[in-house]
Amino acid sequence: MSELKKIREEKNLTQEELAEKSGLSVRTIQRIEAGTEPKGYTLKTLASSLDVSESDLLIPNIPIEPSIEEPILETEDEPIENLGLIKIINLSSLPLCWFPIANFLPPLLVMLISKHRSPIIKQIISLQVILAIIAPIIFFLVAFLKLGNGSVMVTMISLTLANVYIILRNAYELDKKQSLYYKLNFSIL
């Protein structure tokens, strides 16, 4: 058991309480208790927060029996996905899904304004960019083949409905599984 952990437990403090009292992060306290030697400002701050001398924190304590140390949590280093923002970005394509050339602009603008660039958001925008490229190609092929006004209208409605379905299906999967149902194997962004 480290000296810091021993002194902390003698004073009936949790790691979180000591972190709050000293102004240091819980992660720093966990590292010191796991064996990292405190130095400089950290050492002085801990000593003054616990009302002990700096040397008391540095004296190694040889454990007589094996101890089980508290797990070190890495929560500070892990990015937190903002699922609400991701849903908004996905659904922001709906107003312009009838105009395939611009359907990726609303999610792109929301991403740029929010400065949230996770891989899942990049996938949503990349998928809309691909649809913005493919939809006009299909539409112009049908128009150039001169299959009639009815076929052009049916193609336009079908492309819009396909895009609406993709957006709504991805929104459903984001709610249920926090992942996309339709995604690409690459990212354009």
Image (cartoon, grey):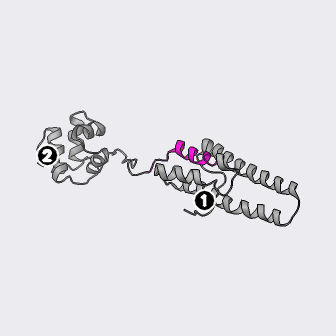
User: In the image, what residue type sits under mark 1?
Assistant: Ser
Q: Quadrant of the C terminus?
A: bottom right
Which residues lie in the magenta part?
79-93
Residue 103 appears at what percent x and percent y? 64, 53
Q: Residue at x 67, y 59 (%)?
A: 132
Residue at label 2? 56
Mark earlier in primary sequence (1, 2):
2
Q: Nearer the viewer, residue 15 or 101?
A: 101
Residue 19 located within the stretch drawn in magenta: no
Q: Nearer the viewer, residue 167 or 11?
A: 167
Q: Residue at x 83, y 57 (%)?
A: 152
Q: Residue at x 72, y 59 (%)?
A: 135
Residue 31 appears at what percent x and percent y? 29, 51
Which secondary structure lies at badge 1?
helix
Question: How many residues crowd around disc 1 within 10 Å: few (fewer than 14), some, or many (20 or more)?
Answer: many
Labels 1 and 2 touching (C-beta < 8 A):
no
What is the CA distance from the residue labelled 1 to the residue labelled 2?
Answer: 57 Å
- With 37 as the anchor, is 138 left or right in this view? right
Which secondary structure lies at badge 2?
helix
Nearest to the eye among marks 1 and 2: give it: 1
Residue at label 1? 126
Q: Quadrant of residue 140?
A: bottom right
